[in-house]
Amino acid sequence: MNFLFISILLFVLIVLYFVVVALWKRRGRLSSLDIKYIKGYWSKIMAESEDNPVKAVLDADKLLDYALGKKGLTGSLGEKLKRGGHFFSDVNGVWSAHKLRNRIAHELSQISDNEVSRGLNLYKKALKDLGAQL
């Protein structure tokens, strides 16, 4: 009787372990719908970048925030970047792009076309690092 109980308990624990591992691995991936949304939104950002480059940077920042949220991170984008820095091949570049967004949002200084272009390229690289196939 004890052997049967222990066998059943062991079986249940093994199944539970594999379920938890599978869910844990899936948690960090973008779904195909998320990737499709990100690609579509990125296309809109690129289309508007020529007419309104400042808005394009602001929208790229929002898109990065969205993608990090889909990866399971919570809080402000700054908090997500602190906790999710390991996702990025160039975490300093991601911070640089986010700081550009903050300059746009909070300062009256002019932003050059080169800064916008560099910032958008950094956002694109960050989104690729997260699994968006741009």
Image: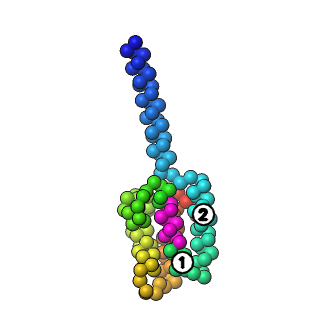
Q: Which mark, residue 76?
A: none
The residue at 47%/31% (across/down) is 15
Which quadrant is the C terminus positioned in? bottom right
The spot of residue 12 in percent (x, y) is 45, 27
In the picture of the structure, the residue carrying the numbered disc 1 is 55
Compared with 21, 126 (above or below) is below
Magenta region, main secondary structure: helix
> What kind of residue is marked 1?
Lys
Mark 1 vs 2: CB contact within 8 A: no
- The residue range painted magenta reads 59-67
Which quadrant is the N terminus positioned in? top left
Which circle, 1 or 2, is nearer the viewer? Answer: 1
Q: Residue furthest top?
A: 1
The spot of residue 53 in percent (x, y) is 55, 80
Compared with 113, 65 (above or below) is above
Q: Is residue 60 magenta?
A: yes
Any part of residue 110 in sight: yes
State the CA–CA distance, disc 1 to disc 2. Answer: 17 Å
For mark 1, give the secondary structure: helix
The residue at 47%/58% (across/down) is 69
Q: Is residue 41 left or right of residue 102?
A: right
Figure quadrant of residue 93: bottom left
> What kind of residue is marked 2?
Lys
The residue at 41%/24% (across/down) is 9
Q: Residues within 10 Å of mark 1 (few under 14, many from 20)?
A: some
Q: Nearer the N terminus, badge 1 or badge 2?
A: 2
Compared with 48, 18 (above or below) is above
The spot of residue 32 in percent (x, y) is 60, 53
In the picture of the structure, the residue carrying the numbered disc 2 is 39
For mark 2, give the secondary structure: helix
